[in-house]
Image: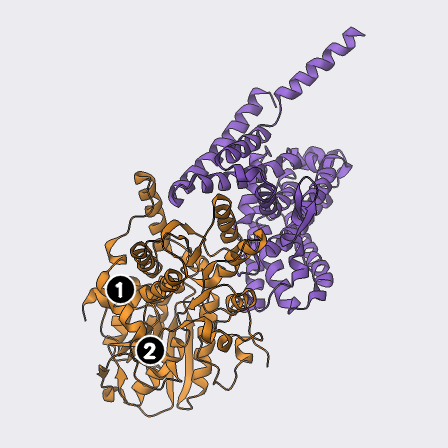
Amino acid sequence: MSAQSLPHIAATQRRLFKINPVYLLVVALILAIVVMNPAFGEPTGYMNYLKRVTALAILSGGALYVIVSGGFDLSVGSMMTLTVIGSSMLASNDPNSTYWIIPLMLGMGLIVGLINGLVVSYLKVPSLIATLGMMITLNGVAFMWSGGAPRGYLPDTFRFFGRYNITDIPVISLLPVAVICLVVFGVILWWGMHRTNFGRMLHAVGDNQQAARLAGVPVERVRISAFVISSLTAVLAGVILGGRAGVSVNIGSGFELQAITAAVIGGAQLLGGRGSVPATIAGALALEAIFTLLNLLGLAQPVRLVVQGLILIGAVAFATYQRKRAGR
Amino acid sequence: MPADERRQAAISGRLREEWENLTREEDVKKIILAAAAFGMLTGAAFSQAPNFDDPAEFAKQRDQLTAAFNGPADKPYLQYAGDSMADTSKFKKEGPWTVCFSNAGVNNPWRVVGYTDMTEEVKLHPEIGTFTHVDAEGSDDKQIADIDDLLAGGNCSVLIVSPNSTAALTPAVEKACAAGLPVIVFDRGVTTNCPVTFVHPVGGYGFGIQAAEHIISNVPAGGKVLMLRILPGVDVLETRASGARNMFKEAGLAVLGEEFTDGDNAKTKSIVEDYLQRGAIDAVWMDAGATAVAAVEAFEDQGVDVPVVTGEDQQDYLQKWRDLGFKGIAPTYPTYQWRTAIIAAVNTLKGEQVPSPEWVLPQPAITQDVLDKYINEKMPPLHYAMCGCEDMPNYPQAWGGTK
């Protein structure tokens, strides 16, 4: 009996030791923010922060699918742009339009993801190039569609997801709809990656494509699915970001790299085969917390950029070091 | 006119640069990098380069804001400051003309509205046989090549240039002048006096002054002002900011901070939210209006009363201002200057007199009492209301509006 329980305790201890450093980073950053600014501990403080991070967190979770499968998706930022611009063009101030616009945009995301996946899988174009091309194309489509300037507003029903707060809730007093979206989509993405056979195949493909193929994994289908999931989350992130901030021509640009950064801070391996959805979401939280903390410190913007860059490099270097030491 | 003064006025067009346009410009990237390095070394905010804080130019533009302009009051695109005119009889030519236009880019909503003003103005002049537009897509190199191509083609009766950047395009403009072509420059300027005229509104200091004066008169002494800017290092955005900063100091207002938004709504909203968490804000000063609505929403979503928030003449801001009833003001950088450029070209080819060496257009601010006049809910959110285009035959459809 005791012989059996001993390894169990050892395993627990090992697991504790192996805790992903990104969680410690998030906790440390948030504690620092609270010390700097006690108002952050109030619901408006931390809920605003969560609301702000939702678009990036969902996007990173989706981008992680592609990263784990051994690819990159650079088209997600422009997919967000297209979602926001396209929705504003189609909505023409009609509050009832939201119910068909969001499904339509998801349909567009599906097609874009399919094209990305097909090009990468069958035309053997490296994903970096294929999705870079898609990024430029989608930006062009958004520009053509709008003629260079947004031509409509997003109705309040559309902005509901990114902007609206549910108030009068006990204990937390207010709950942004965006935070509900974060939890719901976070759980779905976690489940897909870590609790399904598809998730295991995804890891297998990213780790060693040949081995996965020989083991009977439908490599092409898995990779295409990863790109589709990534594009779909980009549409969702676009809906939330557009809801939060409103229409602008360049909305979403730069998010593709932030999403990859969040995944890497969360310990994902850039060449595929390893990555965790919760840790990636924590990576997004850490990224936003760094921005917030530096804002609060009141440093001049150039200093902030330098510090931000150094923290990012440091965080990834530290995470890599930790993993090596932990023998993973 | 002193070269400095002319240059200062010339760069006023640069304020139009949205960040996405600017980041494409190598030189601006260098400026940002240099500024970042400088900031790191000193650990301080950007210190002001003296040419961005020129008291003489500041005073001149302040006077021009309220000065009387020549020309019909209901047609601001025909008005001009001063009496200095150029004789263009040597350029007189029988129609039909080929009007050539080398454009820095059509890459932000302001330029989209302006370019529409221009193409609609062309339609009003039957003497213009051909209107040739070449788009430099925000690149100095492409624009220099474009102008070379236009000159080599030999078809142009007149050349209109909206330079991508001042220094880089000056030689190209000089070359066109040397080829004997009448040249009209507008928006951003060049550092040569060879063009027939340089069309532009009052300028960057003027914009900063209008917004700052409104804040000063609506906020008690000691009030806290947050300054939101698009980017550092761009001359005309710097002049807007330096003008306002000096005025706040004089009036005894405290500047909470100067933050750069990259013209990004989400970032703007986050910055204002963060400042709100740290304490009250009595006014938000903006160097351009594109993200003004996001700043207003930050207050709205926190359930805080919206204080004085300045903006620009975009429809979305004007409507938000009316709907929420906060104390707004919309200084403008009027898009009607795009019309004026065509008018200057037409007058030149007719041999008529043209205000020169500069055609300084009025730069009105939209204030509470005239707000309703400029709101048109049928126009797109980023339509710039000060377009001087309401009297044109294809208004509003050509600008994306509905009747």
- Sequence order check: which comes first, mark 2 or mark 1? 1
Question: Which color was chain A given?
Answer: purple
Residue position marked by numbered label 2 in the rendering: B159
Place of residue A118 in the rendered image (x, y in percent of width and height, measured from the top left): 67, 51
Residue B244 appears anywhere in the view: yes
Residue at image coords 36%, 64%: B213
Farthest bottom residue in view: B94
Amino acid type, residue under disc 1 in the picture: Phe
Residue position marked by numbered label 1 in the rendering: B58
Tell me, yes or no, whether the two marked residues, 2 and 1, touch with CB atoms within 8 Å: no
Q: The orange chain is which one?
A: B
- The vertical placement of B94 against B257, above or below, is below
Look at the image and tell me in which quarter the C terminus of chain B lies. Answer: bottom right
Amino acid type, residue under disc 2 in the picture: Leu
In this rendering, position of residue A47 left or right of residue B290: right
Place of residue B50 in the rendered image (x, y in percent of width and height, measured from the top left): 24, 54
Indicate the secondary structure of the residue bearing disc 1.
Answer: helix
- B147, B280: nearer the viewer: B280
Colouring of the image: by chain
In this rendering, position of residue B396 left or right of residue B104: right
Disc 2 to disc 1, how far (Cα)?
31 Å
Look at the image and tell me in which quarter the N terminus of chain B lies. Answer: bottom left
Farthest right residue in view: A1
Residue at image coords 47%, 31%: A314
Instruction: State the image quarter where residue B91 is shown.
Output: bottom left
For marks 2 and 1, give the one nearer the viewer. 1
- B338, A113: nearer the viewer: B338
Callout 2 environment at 10 Å: few (<14), some (14 to 19), or many (20+)? many
